[in-house]
Image (spheres, rainbow, N blue to C red):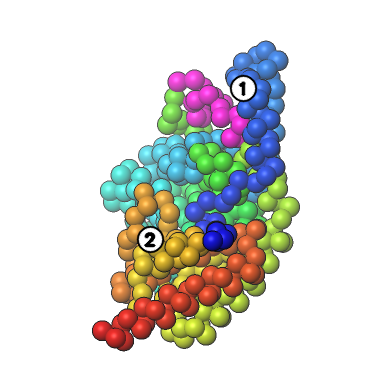
Amino acid sequence: MTAVEPIYLDYNATAPARPEVIALVGEILATVGNASSVHQAGRKARARVDTARQQVADLIGAQARNVIFTGGGTEADNLALRGFGSRHLIVSGIEHGAILAPALLLDPGAAIVDVDHQGRLDLAALEAALAACDGPTLVSLMLANNETGVIQPVAEAVKIAHAHNALVHCDGIQGAGKIAVNIEELGVDLFSLSAHKIGGLQGVGALVMREERTVFAQIVGGGQEMGRRSGTENVAGIAAFGEAARLVAGELAQFTELAQLRDNMEDRLADIAPTRRVIGGGVPRLPNTSCVTMPGVRSDTQVMALDLAGIAVSAGSACSSGKVAASHVLDAMGIAMDEAMTAIRVSLGRETTAAEIERFLTAWAEIYRRNSAHANAA
């Protein structure tokens, strides 16, 4: 019996490591050197880190000296909220848990700003939240939502926040490498990145500052990262991050072309199930992301059935220890629980083909028809 070739449609959870990245990591792991050592081996390791710092900065139009490497996107988000002094915190209701959890821990009175029914930040509500704050404030707004792909009005939010002398952090982890990003054009003060979303390694991230600022390090002891984040540098992981950043920066046009494949898929799903709903489909989204409902069929049922067909998708965020539960993002958008529990996320990547989408459509249709038949029989 011929094995079915697996299809990966969960790029927003993690992207496959690039072949060039794998080769570079192997090359570095075959050598030795601590980037803090002053001998030749240490200097070579330091050069790897410095090159990667410039490559990551170039991806978003930043200055290399303002890139702080971390142990992942979650740490970068935490550093943004914790590393710039005690502040009132304002976050949107659709932020990743890496923002919502520390925000509520640090500031139990943190303002959670509403989004509209398409999942975009309510700018008037942001203005009101800022007006109600007395003292130093930080606003955190993601660039694009990891579940729906909806792109946020970050530049507009920055103008409002800066008028109130608030700092602005942008969790750009899901958007960078998928759409063009320039930290100067956005105007944000802080920007988070994660290597594994763009074909680097898991466990490496960065917090980037638009302008040099004093950072209160949350991990201390060795003074690495110019005293901003201690710990022996993960030279292989950091270099891989830089290489992935260099590669995706040159492929943005190619990535944008995925929107046509995604849109065609969504149209075909409507032919199968006319009442299917594309969450956030009425506003600009990441070109690779579709959050779509299957009427009457639970998300976990779909994910498991598709997995049995050799197709990997998600039900919402993949960063919650494998749990399949109601999405706080869809709840914030005002989507009824019954409908929200039928949504899955399909996220395409650079290696996704039309033939793979055809297989997904066939499997999705079979799941829908089978469950509809069972429902009618009952």
Q: Name the spot of residue 57 as percent of width and height, x first.
A: 65, 42
Could you tell me what secondary structure mostly forms the magenta stretch? Answer: loop
Q: Is residue 233 magenta?
A: yes
Q: Is residue 53 visible?
A: no
Rendered view: 92 above or below 214: below
Q: Which residues are magenta?
A: 221-238
2 vs 1, front mark: 1
How far is disc 2 from disc 1 in space, using C-alphas?
40 Å
7 left or right of 318 in image: right
The amino acid sitting under disc 2 is Gly
Residue reaching furthest top? 39
Instruction: Work out which quarter of the rendered image holds the N terminus and state it.
Output: bottom right
Numbered circle sitting on residue 361? none
Q: Which residue is mark 1?
A: 35
121 left or right of 297 in image: right
Q: Name the spot of residue 201 as percent of width and height, x first.
A: 56, 41
Q: Which residue is mark 2?
A: 93
The amino acid sitting under disc 1 is Ala
Q: Name the spot of residue 157 as percent of width and height, x first.
A: 50, 60
133 left or right of 308 in image: left
Residue 361 vs residue 201, the one in the foreground: 361
Q: Is residue 310 magenta?
A: no
Residue 58 vs residue 202, the one in the foreground: 202
Residue found at x 65% / y 65%: 353
Residue reaching furthest left? 378
- Between disc 2 and disc 1, whose residue precedes? 1
How many marks are shown on the rendered structure? 2
Residue found at x 63% / y 19%: 33
Instruction: Work out which quarter of the rendered image holds the C terminus and state it.
Output: bottom left
Residue found at x 68% / y 35%: 24
